[in-house]
Image (spheres, rainbow, N blue to C red):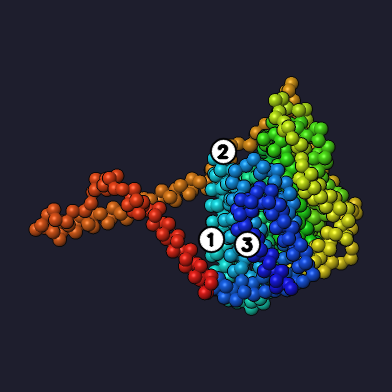
Amino acid sequence: MSSFLLLFLVFFPFLAAYFVYPMRRRGREYRNLYVRIIPGVEIFAALLLLFAPGTVVLPQLCGLGLRFEAGSLHTTMAVLAAFLWLMTALPSKEYFADREGVNRYYCAWMMTLGALMGVFLAADFFTLFIFFEIMSFASYVWVAQNENPDALRAGQTYLAVAVFGGMMLLVGLLMLDHLLGSLVFRELPALVAALEDGRRGELLAAGLFCLTGFGAKAGMVPLHIWLPKAHPVAPAPASALLSGILTKSGIFGILIISRYLLFSSVEWNGVLLLSGTVTMVLGAVLALFSVNLKRALACSSMSQIGFILIGVAMQGYLGEDNVLAAWGTVLHMVNHGLIKLVLFVSAGVIYLATHALDLNELRGWGRNKPALKAIFFVGAAAIVGVPGTSGYISKTLLHESIVEYVHHLEDIGRFAAGFQTVEWLFLISGGLTAAYMTKLFAAIFVEKRAEKQRFSAREYMTPATGLAVGLTACLLVVFGLTPWVSMQVIAERSSVFLRAGESHGIFRYFSWVNMQGALISLCIGAAVYLLIVRTVLCRRTAEGTVYLERWPRGLDLEELVYRPAVKGLAFLGAMCARTAAGLGDFLVVAGEKLLYLKAPGIFVPKKNENFGVYARKPKRFLIGETFAFDLTLAGIGLVGALTYIFFTG
């Protein structure tokens, strides 16, 4: 039973993707119903997998074979992915009602679901890598879907980061396979334990290559550049999935590297802690300065990934006593997915009604919309970590894991100032989260309505959309009020995969000591909002509050560093090619002079004017002599070779 369910969850969405176009030819309503049924079937199968843990191996497939495993964190992430897909399918009908290229989007949407299932259910790194790359290329369609200049440029950035990250990941996995002889997760701890001490540096290097690949997808600094660019231009349902679950595929890989390969490595945990802290703080600052609704939510996702990375690092520092860090990491992954579904789909509702994302154009639009106001408030409160919401539970666990390690260092007489600094940056970032979410909520639902605001003649939120965001918002509250019977069960079940330590007694989530962290962050948030947002980032006018874009445009890492670097490398490559070509011409001319001294003019190298004959050739001959034609033939050959390897390897 488990073998069938595993293969079904991975390959059924790929098969279903090919029927999107035929269903559309029968009618738009058939297709819209179809794309809601597929994730419904997937979530039913994923829930069945909760009661049927197991493994399945497809030997020799893709050369090395594919391995899948159910249980613990594998199944938790599969259920979460299927749930988010179903919830984003509900509002998609209205969101794409008058848009072009919808069949293409849905086809890529289903393929991405299958690929993501392959990532979360993978039992070895080879299988994970195969589906990780399929996921990256399929989800590119989401970013470039609107086909306007901003979308195409953001898609270019997304694809470049994905390709670079994939190549770094491949290098790391090749190093691991050479070093350990296996990429199967269950076999890795024993192989690492038997590794010679002199080769630990190679293991760390391989881990860092893998971290680059997984971190690029997660949105970790400095490979976060795609996140703030992709979300504002992608359709809102796609943004919810990009932020809520696709980034978790990168975190999933980092968790495996951390727990199965480099759990006790001080250097590795230090890199994770530093990168997580920088990502957490920088994302919060960028979100605070943003005046674009979806960009602010995208930068917020980047910040929350930083919170999760800190949890991953603390698991390593705490060793066998890492239960709080493990629980907090898993639960914040789940919470962040649910929260971003609420916030991004709500942003989609707002965009459909106003066709705007700038806060100055959205100002006051939601004043008389109590349902959406309540739903957005719950999502905002959950991501801030307000007690009574699920976000409070996971953030409290992460915070207490840092506090626990600080106390441990003090008890053994070790220097703890570094981790105390991390703790305060954790609380300050939580305060910045409260400040920018207050800014968004106040601008859209509280401020005086902007003049010449565009209104939609139809109902602003359909019942299907209301069901998606309303149900998810209710889950955030229910989980937050009943952590012992809901979230803790998820954490205990999922942390088996992370080989977390045992819990000692009942964790008192709502004790005064544990609530202090959340209250400190809320106070910091109130101070930042009043002293910075309302004075520096806003200007009061007779028409109402104007939100100012204060972030310097020149501080764009992509435009400042990455694109100039790529252009420089391209120029260097072209210069080397021209030099090599010039050397060839020189050798030809030298050969003519030396070898044909008695017959000058018989051997004459072609000059530039000889290539002018292309203009006089028929088009069908000209196409056959172009570089694009050569690339097409090479691509056909590559596809044929890969197909042969896939079925006969």
In terms of secondary structure, where does tag 2 sit?
A: loop
Would you call the spot at circle 3 few (<14 residues within 10 Å), some (14-19), or many (20 or more)? some
Q: Nearer the viewer, residue 531 or 354?
A: 354
Q: What mark, if any, has residue 554 been given in the picture?
A: 2
Percent coordinates x, y for residue 387 in the rendering: 86, 49
Identify which residue is drawn at 84% across, 63% down: 489
> Of tags 1 and 3, which is closer to the observer?
3
- Asked if the residues shown at circle 3 and circle 2 are in contact, with their CB atoms under 8 angstroms apart, the answer is no
Q: Position of residue 286 (x, y in %)?
A: 67, 42
Residue 396 position in % (x across, y down)? 82, 54
How far apart are the alpha carbons under marks 3 and 2?
Answer: 46 Å
Residue 486 visible, this orientation:
yes
**Which marked residue is nearer to the observer: mark 1 or mark 2?**
1
Q: Secondary structure at mark 1?
A: helix
Residue nearer the viewer, 91 or 555? 91
Mark seen at residue 333: none
Give the residue type that dot 2 points to: Gly
Which residue carries the number 1 mark? 167
Considering the image in quadrants, where does the N terminus appear?
A: bottom right
Q: Residue 328: x and y, percent?
A: 78, 58
Residue designated by label 3: 15
